[in-house]
Each structure stands twice: as C-alpha cells, then as structure tokens.
Image (cartoon, grey):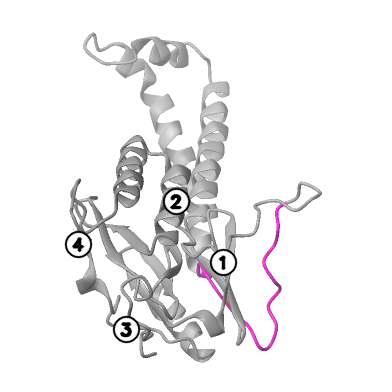
Amino acid sequence: MSSDNPSFKAPPKDSPDGLPKAPPSPSPDRTVVGASTGERVLLWAGFPVLGAVVLWLLSRAAGWVASLPWAPLQGPFKLVASVPEPQVSIGAVILGVLLGLGIAFFAESEYVTAVIGPEQAVLTVDRVSRTVPRASTAAVFKDGKNLVLLGHDTTELARLRGDFDVARFAAAFQRHGYPWQPDGDPYAADFRRWVAAQPDLPEAAHALLKAREHALKKGHKEDAEQLRTELSALGIVVREGKDKAQQWRRTRAASGDADGTGA
C-alpha cells in the first residue's frame, strides 16, 4: 500500500485532537464503496461465534488432552481441566468472543474503501487515507491484490494492498469518469526483475532497492513504502512479483517520453 507520487501525500492517521481522521461524507455526487454488508456481518458476527465455539470445545476436551503424555501444552490444558463448571465454559465462551472480535478488527482494516467523486477519490486501507485528484489520474486497475492509480507520466499515484470487490470498484470509478483498465496494468510489460548492479540503473536506485529488499524480508512495511516513495522521486516504479522479488520500470517522464497513458 502506498502513495508513490510525492505530490500526493497521505493525510496523517490522526487529526490534531488525536482522534482518527474520517474520510469525506458521502453525497449525491460521490460513491462510497468498500466491504459489503454480508462481508461485515461475517466478520463481526461470524468470527466471535466461531471463536466461542472453538474455545468451548477445547475447554471440554482439556481433561482428555491433559491425560495424553505426548500432547503439547499439557500445563495449560491441566489448568483448564482443573477449573470447575460452569466457570470454565463461561470463561471459554467469553475469551472466544473477544478473540473473534480481535480477528474481525484486524480483518476489517484489510478492506480497501473509497469515496469517489468527480474531482477526487479518497482511498483508505489499514486506517490510512490518501487523496488522488481525478485530473491527475490516467489509469486505474487491479494488480494482483493491489488497487493502483497511475498519473499521466505513468508514476503510481497510489498502490493499495487489501481486499476489494473488483467489479464494484470498477463500476464506481467508471461512474465518475476515471479511466478503469479492465485488462490490468497497461505498462506491465515494462517491468523487469531487479538484479544488483544492473548497468541501466543508477547507483542511488540500486541502494534504495537493496534497502527495500531488506525491509521486505524483515516485514518492515512502513520502511518499504518510504523507500518506494524515494524510488518514485528518481523516476522508478517498483512492485513485487508473484515470487515476492522486486520488479521495476521507469516512468515515461524519466525515459523522456512526454506521452501519457492515452486514457
């Protein structure tokens, strides 16, 4: 998830008073798209119920598991088996519900939501929002699990990784005149796998790609996104392939091509 053009910086997570910054409210000239009602019901009702059932079943089986000399975690199972009924069942159900709510909270943050209007789109994932003007947008498409918006010089204005319904997002963008690309990235063929010391990349780009490779391996997402932004300033667009290896291409401006996407 990222906003790769330095001209379009993501708004801060929090407002000055410390409260979460909410996206613009919907209006007749805006379309709000995100998780469906069914998906949200599954998250906030299904996971707590599932958690309660699973932990209740484990509590009922605790005595049997504790009697198996080869079973792992015998200490915790013996402790659970020593708690009388109905306390153990009530505790298991409450803990399962809380666990399910926690899972639902994190799963909810993985959904991409958008407020799309004729002048701009406000895109949110993982409680971070970024705003992309319609006039600056030359292409919108799905790239794997990412929603991507390109500028007229083929720079990535935003790359958001998360769950989203492609058909609903495509319809919403097209409704407001955004150039949705049903065939995906129009510049996919320009990407090449990054290999250290490639002669057609400057040393500064190699250094940033090497640092980003390290950040990706360590799971440091914020560092990886910051390095993506720094590469964008050099005219380099970067993404990860199916094998998680970094791929790169130059923007049209960086390669001297003044044309846009044609959208």
Q: Residue at x 18, y 49 (%)?
A: 195
In the displayed structure image, the side of residue 222 where residue 199 appears, left or right: left
Residue 192: where, in percent of width, then height? 19, 62
Q: Which residue is mark 2?
A: 225
3 and 2 marks in contact (CB < 8 Å): no
Q: Which residue is mark 1?
A: 8
Closer to us: 48 or 82: 48
**Sequence-first disc among 1 and 2:** 1
**Sequence-first disc among 2 and 4:** 4
From where the camera sits, is residue 191 visible? yes
Q: Which residue is mark 3?
A: 182
Marking on residue 192 = 4
Q: Answer whether residue 21 is magenta in the image.
A: yes
2 and 4 marks in contact (CB < 8 Å): no
Q: Residue at x 70, y 62 (%)?
A: 22
Q: Answer whether residue 249 is magenta in the image.
A: no
Closer to us: 21 or 185: 185
Quadrant of the snapshot with the N terminus: bottom left
